[in-house]
Amino acid sequence: MSFTIAIIGRPNVGKSTLFNRLVGQKLALVDDQPGVTRDRREGAARLGDLRFTIIDTAGLDEGARGSLTARMQEQTEAAIAAADALMFVIDARVGLTPTDRAFADFARRANKPVVLVANKSEGRHGEAGALESYALGLGDPVPISAEHGEGLGDLYDALRVLMPEPELDEDEDEDNGAEGEERDPARPIRVAVLGRPNAGKSTLINHLLGEERLLTSPEAGTTRDSIAVDVTWQGRAFRVFDTAGLRRRSRIEDKLEKLSVSDALRAVRFAEVVVLTMDAQNRFEEQDLRLADLVEREGRAIVLAVNKWDLMERAPNQIGKLREAADHWLPQVKGAPVVAVSGLMGEGIDRLMGAIEDAYRVWNRRVPTSALNRWFEQAVGHNPPPAVAGRRLRLNYITQTKARPPSFVVFCTRADAVPESYLRYLVNSLRAGFDLPGTPIRITLREKANPFAHKARRKS
């Protein structure tokens, strides 16, 4: 198991900036205002030849029992319990505060190795604050600037003492990683849970995990970062991303909310299956339809989860009506799985996970070329493309270029003249003919080269 280090400290000392620096990506949201990070986030960190797991945590702060602040601190305490060592971060430009001193005692009581990091140490003010941190009694401070990447050599030396000997990195061929992932059946399915604010996304994921891993609250907007958690369900591995609730663009004014939305959209692009979570009492609202359209444009498999089903009165054929409504409002993903769930009560979770696996299989499906062209002949024969400006359109043959999502190329004459309505007919016929419900389908038109074009040029 990887050596694990938790980054702790009071709010706004640069913990998330340091986390991003060590993982080599801007995974955690960073902003000038304190309290941006709420849930704990894990990442694979690298510093020289050191490889370890790093945990970004919410700023240590005091709050009333049961409040959001207190529950954020509980998340931090859970990260400390899971870690092998701690990085206690202070702001060297501000110097020591009473909060720093209080939580230095907290770090000592954890009875784990502590590396004292004096962040923002660039400049004269930073140097003075770094020297002041000796008063915490946590050993020699490591002066760094996480934002500018300064002092990382000293940080390496401090961590090298704590960690076991680095193992040889056998996975050197990183460029071929993506191809290898597609062939590895044991690789986790990447799932993004998307939806409007307060649709119950975090509650749903907590039930999957069997613990209060993600902060939940009746207030909308509790989740800010896209947090990835690993779930094993009936022997199948999933990597699930909880995302911030997405409101209409016209309502987003706060800078931090814009960052959260950007992070959620990145999670969708990284995912393979997107679970669009809707409130059962307010389903298929305009924003739900916009989000479904976004998922289809990004080419991701989609599962519709109608959450808070425990609040609905039971009536005959409710699920059938849900499916009819989904096909009516979302014709671009016709046949997408619709699952009624309750994240709070755990209803429908088995069906949801099964639907995710089914959607993933369809998204990866390849159609045999011979069967594809037999279908194509019949589809064009039953409903030929319309003539345009008195000239007939010829569709010659079709081939599948890739899966994830299923993508096809149709070779034809006058590709720019084929109407969108005819492409929709082909997509719907493909769905029915090869059992491709709900997944995005891409059809590209390509004009076949004219074998007599050189003769025409010679005559002219």
Image (cartoon, rainbow, N blue to C red):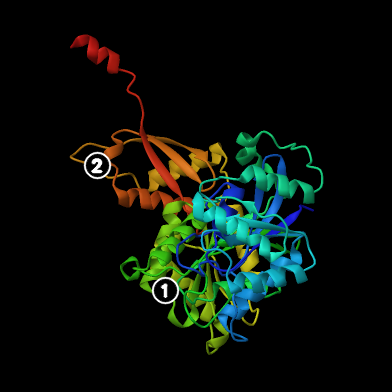
Q: Amino acid at mark 2?
A: Ala
How many C-alpha atoms fall within 10 Å of the one at disc 1: few (<14), some, or many (≥20)? some
Residue at the disc numbered 2: 387
Residue 376: give x, y in percent of width and height. 45, 42
Disc 2 to disc 1, C-alpha distance = 38 Å
Of the pair 394 and 450, the residue shown nearer to us: 450
Residue 27: give x, y in percent of width and height. 54, 55
In the figure, residue 342 lies in which quadrant? bottom right
**Along the horizontal axis of the image, is 441 left or right of 28?**
left
Image quadrant in which the C terminus is located: top left
Task: Give the label on residue 284, or none.
Answer: 1
Query: Residue visible at 76% across and 52% down?
Result: 2
Of the pair 450 and 287, the residue shown nearer to us: 287
How many C-alpha atoms fall within 10 Å of the one at disc 2: few (<14), some, or many (≥20)? few
Disc 2 vs disc 1: which is toward the camera? 1
In the figure, residue 157 lies in which quadrant? top right
- Secondary structure beneath dot 1 equals loop
Identity of the residue furthest to the bottom in this view: 313
Q: Earlier in the sequence, mark 2 or mark 1?
A: 1
- Secondary structure beneath dot 2 equals loop
From this view, report whether residue 90 is shown above or below residue 53: below
Whether residue 271 is visible, yes or no, is no
Task: Give the label on residue 82, or none.
Answer: none
Q: Amino acid at mark 1?
A: Phe
Query: Residue visible at 48% across and 61% down?
Result: 264
From this view, report whether residue 297 is shown above or below residue 46: below
Query: Residue visible at 70% across and 66% down?
Result: 79
